[in-house]
């Protein structure tokens, strides 16, 4: 956040260049702020409507001086033509203060309140909104810090019944959905950060303008999202949202940081929450909450896609990972055979040793896919019982995870990493010994952030064919789109996005 007036003005112009409609100016972050001199500079140079905020320490801001001086500065900002002034509820309740500000025919008053802890109960929210409306606010702004994504439902409900323009959202990664779904439920504003100055729980301006395009979101928009923990790494919104628009489908795809599956499905049970992708670590556990499971997903024991059936609201689970992962590996092998001038048999995996690291949802999909192609399978997982269970299911062999470092595969084997090892931000790790990589003909990494993981770089240096998790991601996303929309996915359009954005 800008700490000088000069930087503040630069940031305002940068925000405009990135597509902002309004910019918030935090006076309390400016070092040695001099209202009489510097407010005029800010307001004369504003390229956009501005919200002036001068937050005191007692309300979570940086200002530690005299409160009367702070309020005088806000009144001065109003006199100088500020478009909006943000007042804390405690201050706005002082009628003299609001009357003083309301003399301006230009400035609108935003009355804000930051709730300590989680989102209040429905009854407490109603009382809070009632007291905020009583101040005569033009807009009310309520900020919380949800401890669970299910608490956001109360904020969505608040937006739908508030008779004053309202902004209600939660901070932090669990609260990101509250910003992105704001226009669906009638919110007045959406906060976003300037690119390069990310704030947890806030989308970037770039993502709003190019991925989400919230101007197309309305009350009829169907909500889809990735259920995962963590969820910040997901590239799903970058791919699914533009594809929805390309296909003229009224949907939005958002990250969903979920702590408790049971609570989540209990709270978000309405038809408007129409479908879900399922990521780490829930692909196996989520089966319990599906009313029906597709036979392939049932056999694998993992679901990565759920649709809410419109006719009866039942949750139907699918697995699009299995074919996506195996065909990505097969396609790479066939392409290499073509380059080498060899015949590209349809059964390029038959009889090969297929080493799977990780027996979770992605690992199960890979193992079942490899079994369907006639490969010989070895499973490594930190949970020995889970490794043995999967090995039995695919007629393979389970090995102790500690043996992986010294495991010497036969020449021509295939290695598939289905663990989060190497995922951003811990990008310097690989799940196997670097010395063994040269013995594998193909190395696949389900991790796709970064696109070329250290495992793939080391494997490529050792002479192996490498297959990025991006290929699996694209193929499974194509399958998901078909299930979500009931339409045929525009494959080439989706591939272009992946190639340009990933």
Image (spheres, rainbow, N blue to C red):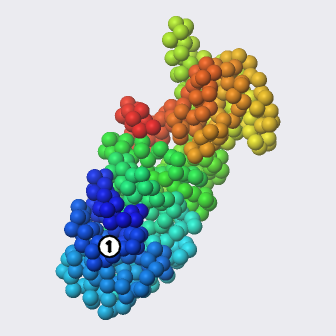
Q: Is residue 159 above or below residue 172?
A: below
Position of residue 485 measured from the top left corner of the image (x, y, whole percent): 41, 44
Q: Is residue 218 visible?
A: no
The N terminus: image quadrant? bottom left
Q: Which residue is mark 1?
A: 52
For the point 32% across and 41% down, the residue is: 246
Quarter location, residue 393: top right
- Image quadrant containing the C terminus: top left
Please give the count of numbered marks on the rendered protein: 1
Q: What residue is rendered at 51% in x and 55% in y?
A: 256
Q: Nearer the viewer, residue 412 or 460?
A: 460
Q: Residue at x 32, y 89 (%)?
A: 97
Residue at x 58%, y 29% (from the top left corner): 457
Q: Is residue 350 above or below residue 265?
A: above
Tell whether 238 sits left or right of 446: left
The kind of secondary structure element at disc 1 is: strand
Tell me: residue 344, above or below residue 307: above
Is residue 435 visible in the rendered structure shown here?
yes
Q: Could you say which quadrant of the image residue 271 lies in?
A: bottom left
Q: How would you rate the neighbour count of disc 1 (Cα within 10 Å): few for under 14, some for 14-19, many for 20 or more?
A: many
- Using the image as rendered, state which of residue 424 and residue 292 is in the foreground: 424
């Amino acid at each position: 956040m800008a700490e000088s007036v000069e930087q503040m003005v630069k940031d305002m112009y940068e925000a405009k260049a990135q597509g902002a409609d309004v910019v918030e100016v935090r006076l309390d972050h400016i070092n040695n702020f001099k209202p009489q001199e510097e407010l005029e500079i800010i307001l004369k140079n504003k390229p956009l409507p501005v919200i002036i905020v001068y937050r005191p320490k007692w309300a979570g801001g940086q200002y530690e001086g005299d409160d009367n001086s702070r309020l005088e500065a806000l009144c001065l900002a109003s006199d100088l033509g500020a478009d909006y002034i943000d007042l804390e509820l405690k201050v706005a309740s002082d009628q003299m203060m609001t009357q003083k500000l309301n003399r301006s025919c230009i400035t609108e008053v935003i009355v804000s309140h930051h709730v300590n802890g989680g989102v209040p109960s429905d009854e407490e929210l109603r009382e809070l909104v009632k007291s905020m409306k009583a101040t005569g606010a033009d807009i009310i702004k309520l900020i919380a810090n949800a401890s669970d994504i299910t608490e956001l439902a109360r904020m969505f409900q608040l937006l739908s019944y508030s008779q004053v323009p309202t902004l209600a959202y939660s901070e932090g990664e669990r609260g990101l959905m509250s910003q992105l779904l704001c226009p669906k439920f009638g919110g007045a504003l959406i906060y976003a950060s300037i690119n390069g100055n990310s704030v947890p729980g806030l989308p970037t301006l770039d993502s709003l303008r190019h991925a989400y395009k919230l101007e197309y979101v309305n009350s009829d928009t169907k909500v889809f999202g990735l259920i995962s923990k963590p969820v910040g790494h997901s590239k799903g919104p970058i791919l699914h949202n533009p594809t929805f628009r390309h296909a003229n489908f009224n949907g939005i795809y958002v990250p969903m940081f979920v702590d408790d599956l049971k609570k989540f499905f209990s709270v978000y049970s309405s038809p408007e929450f129409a479908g879900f992708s399922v990521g780490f670590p829930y692909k196996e556990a989520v089966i319990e909450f599906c009313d029906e499971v597709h036979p392939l997903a049932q056999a694998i024991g993992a679901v990565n896609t759920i649709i809410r059936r419109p006719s009866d609201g039942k949750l139907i689970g699918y697995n699009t990972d299995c074919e996506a992962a195996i065909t990505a590996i097969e396609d790479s092998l066939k392409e290499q055979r073509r380059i080498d001038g060899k015949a590209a048999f349809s059964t390029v995996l038959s009889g090969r040793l297929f080493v799977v690291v990780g027996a979770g949802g992605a690992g199960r999909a890979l193992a079942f896919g490899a079994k369907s192609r006639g490969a010989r399978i070895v499973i490594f997982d930190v949970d020995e019982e889970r490794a043995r269970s999967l090995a039995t299911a695919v007629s393979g062999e389970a090995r102790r995870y500690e043996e992986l470092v010294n495991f010497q595969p036969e020449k021509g084997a295939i290695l598939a990493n289905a663990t989060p090892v190497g995922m951003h931000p811990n990008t310097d790790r690989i799940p196997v010994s670097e010395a063994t990589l040269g013995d594998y003909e193909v190395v696949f990494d389900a991790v796709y952030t970064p696109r070329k993981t250290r495992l793939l770089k080391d494997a490529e240096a050792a002479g192996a064919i490498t297959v990025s998790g991006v290929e699996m991601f694209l193929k499974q996303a194509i399958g998901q789109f078909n299930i979500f929309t009931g339409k045929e996915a525009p494959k080439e359009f989706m591939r272009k996005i992946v190639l340009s954005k990933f």
